[in-house]
Image (spheres, rainbow, N blue to C red):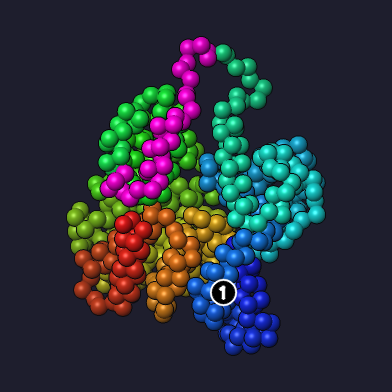
Amino acid sequence: MNESRKLKLIERDLGEKAYNEIVQQMSLEIQKNRTKRLLYLTDSISASKLERLVKKERLVSSMLHTELINYIIFELREQGAVWSSKKDLFRLLAPKLDFSKYRSSWFDWLSPKKDDRNITKNEIKLAIEETLGLNSLIWSEPEYKQEQIVHKKVKEFMNKKDTSPPQNSEKIDISSLLLSEEPISERQKEIISKIKKSREQNIKKIVKMESKEFSFDSKNQNFLLEVLPILYDKGCYESLNTSIFPYLFPKYRERIDIKIKEANTLANLKNPDYRRVVELLNSIPRNSEDEEIDITTAIISNIRRDKLNVKKIKQDEVEFFLLFIIEHYEKVYRHKKPYHYYPAINLAYMVRLLQIVSSSSSEIDKYNLEEIYSSVKASIKNEKRLERDLSYYATISELEFLLLLDYPNIKSKIEYILETLQPKVFLVERTVKQMRWFVNIAKEFSSKEIETLVRFKRVIELFEDYLHYIKN
């Protein structure tokens, strides 16, 4: 559910008069910023009450049409679909329609600066329904059901798309030479059910006991593909590295979504293989500027983790290497307007770290963290509208900016995020890894007493408590 709908829920709960009185008490900056306005108003009714209101609303209310279209786009991206432009995305979803007739509306609907709304161009809705095999009732189903249906239909669409031959090409039939990939067996379904209900230590035992099913065999491919995202969400990196990726057929291992998961898995092992991570990320094709930004930022981050390590780097090398990394993050950050928060938050971490460990201010003065944060608010706002993983990344990145800028009361905001979004293990572990790295480098190479680090430590403890709770 996006921020506008949450604000309307709060207004409905408080009543128009009480709502307006609270809004009038806000500063002009908060009134103009939807995210800050939501955080401010959430305190008026409590985070837990807002969560109850949202859950209740999702059971009875539908997403607005443009909100649902953006959710469909999120699911396509999540499941490995690629496109080079908004025009290509239109052709993917509505291949029989003339883009030139709908260009203005399409760009308007996808703009993060526009409020979501219902649309009157039924031909586009019909085209999307036909492409994804959706029933026309999808536009009026409750939100929770819309998400379930879209996830299922996009998955079916991607599977069909991956296995269909290229257009205008004659397929050479060698099916008699190939072993068919069998559907998931009843035994494998039982194993999947056990894994879904188990914690990491028990999962390791299950994988070991059922080693026959975790092998390079045509009978196991669909099973392995089903188990992979479950283990990934639970943060079971050792099992993924030893018992899933090595046994996938090459055609699956070359899929973009699987390559990204393998790269993140290797980066999160107890002994990370950062060189292999960079190789994998480099092998992924970039079909748009946004993908170029995402992948390049991820490559820089993994090189940074490998090189800027307390066990490898010396005191007199830290400042030089930080400046080197800052230069590269800045190139990605300034590559395209509107600026994207992903390279920006990494740049902000490095600049703040340089402020802490550096003895000179000449290089530091070039960067203004408040300005960097302000420049990516639109990007954060756009992705916070999306559900699941992307919403968490955007939300937590904003709070990381505020931590780096020494804003007060961020811990309570993060408590609210953990309570409402209930992020998966792998998402939280990535956040904690970044924060721990930042604190460890700062402590190792600076003797300054910094309040920022105290706040980060408190937040890390909060995340660790959350991880302990959901893992045990």
Element on which disc 1 rests: helix
Type of the residue with mark 1: Leu
Quadrant assignment for the C terminus: bottom left
User: Residue at 57% of width from left, 14% of height from top?
Assistant: 172
- Count of number-bearing discs: 1
Residue bearing the label numbered 1: 38
Quadrant assignment for the N terminus: bottom right
Q: Position of residue 99 (x, y in %)?
A: 75, 43
Q: Is residue 177 left or right of residue 274?
A: right
Residue 192, can we see it?
yes
Q: Residues within 10 Å of mark 1 (few under 14, many from 20)?
A: some
User: Residue at 51% of width from left, 11% of height from top?
Assistant: 176
- Relative vertical location of residue 5 with respect to residue 99 in this rendering, above or below: below
Residue 186 covered by magenta stretch: yes
- Relative vertical location of residue 331 with respect to residue 51 in this rendering, above or below: above
Which of the 4 image quadrants contains residue 26? bottom right
Q: Which residues are magenta?
A: 174-203
Q: Position of residue 456 (x, y in %)?
A: 33, 70
User: Residue at 76% of width from left, 44% of height from top?
Assistant: 126
Which SS type dominates the magenta stretch? helix
Residue 342 covered by magenta stretch: no
Which of the 4 image quadrants contains residue 94? top right
User: 211 or 250, which lies in front?
Assistant: 211
Q: Is residue 346 left or right of residue 165?
A: left
User: Residue at 23% of width from left, 68% of height from top?
Assistant: 443
Residue 39, can we see it?
no
Q: Position of residue 420 (x, y in %)?
A: 49, 66
User: 268 or 177, which lies in front?
Assistant: 177
User: 295 or 130, which lies in front?
Assistant: 130
- Relative vertical location of residue 400 with respect to residue 77 in this rendering, above or below: below
Q: Position of residue 336 (x, y in %)?
A: 55, 55
